[in-house]
Structures are given as C-alpha cells and as structure tokens.
Image (cartoon, grey):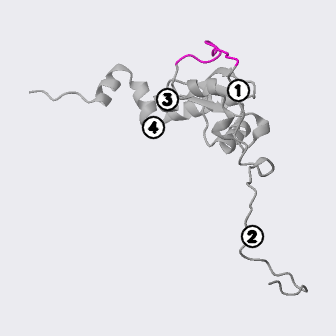
Amino acid sequence: MHPQPSAVAVCTLLDPMASLKELFGIDKLIKLRDTVKAIGGIRAVLKKRYLTDVTRVGTLVGEDKFGNKYYEDNSYFLARNRWVEYPEKVWLDYDATQIPPEWHRWIHHIGDKAPTVEPPVDHKWILEHRENTSVYTGEKYVPYSTTRAKITSWQPGQPKQT
C-alpha cells in the first residue's frame, strides 16, 4: 500500500516557486507591500492602524450621507469581510450607532445587496437616523432629582450645616 502524498509535496510538484514563497513567508511580504501601496504609504498605514486597529484593503461599496465608507473583501471569512471606515472628523469617537439602518442591514449580512444597489423603501413614518448622543456630556439625559442629598460637602470657612 502506497502512502498518500502530502499537500506540500503536491504543491511542490505543481508549482515549486509558490511553495517556496509560502515556506519562507515571502507571499505575506508581497501582500504587505501591496496593502501599503493601496492605502497610500507607510504613514497612511500607521494612521489607519491607529484609528481602526486593522489594516485592510477592499472594494469600496458605497458611502452614506454621514461620510462613512463601506468596504468589502470576500477573501476574509464571512463575519469579517465587510467593514466601515468612519470620516476624519469623527477621529477616535466612533461607535456603531453612527451607521444608518440601511447600511447596518448590509454590514451584518441581513441582506446581500448594498443600499447603493437596492435602495431601501422610504416610508413617511420612518424617522431620520441619529446617532446615540447619550455618551456626550452636553447632550446626556440627566433626570431631575426630587430628593435631598444624603451628604453635604464641607466648605472651609463656613459654619457647620445641620
């Protein structure tokens, strides 16, 4: 009985240069070079890495009215093949509520067609999308308290309050 050839041996027989590139990791360096070139240089890669913690290149699918850009690259596995890049003005203050519902549907694989290909139905009862502003101090909801404070802070030079 003959042993089955391994995948490396078969790959070597088919394309010896491909297996050497994979063996020494040269294919990864080539992909890194192509990614840096597509993003716009090392400085742009470092900035993108700082802002989003990932360095990916994909096909631009569309842009929403808030300036968010949506990308897709099907070489990644299903849950990671679609992503959003927020505009410069947001800087590091981005969150998921800045994605409108029609793009949320696409990015989470609820639908396969992007809103640029198949626009959502516009009903008059649908409200305009707003991001969650409860994290910003000026716009945060703070309920009015009707109870007295349990403690009072001491102010130097003032008489004791009872």
N-term-proximal mark, 3 vs 4: 4
Residue drawn at (90%, 85%) of the image: 158
- Quadrant location of the N terminus? top left
Mark sitting earlier along the chain (2/3):
3
Which mark is first along the chain, 3 or 1? Answer: 3
- Secondary structure, mark 1, is loop
Segment colored magenta: 112-124
Pick the front one: 6 or 66:
66
Secondary element at tag 2: loop
The residues tagged by marks 4 and 1 sit, at their Cα atoms, a distance apart of 55 Å
Label 1 packing within 10 angstroms: few (<14), some (14-19), many (20+): few
The reply, left or right, for residue 105 in relation to residue 130 is left
Q: Mark 4 points at which residue?
A: 24
Task: Give the x, y percent position of residue 3.
Answer: 16, 29
Name the front one of labels 1 and 3: 1
Which residue in the structure is indicated by mark 1?
Answer: 127
> On the image, which quarter does residue 148 sit in?
bottom right
Q: Which residue is drawn at 78% across and 47% down?
A: 139
Q: Is residue 95 above or below residue 114?
A: below
Q: Looking at the picture, which amino acid does disc 1 mark?
A: Leu
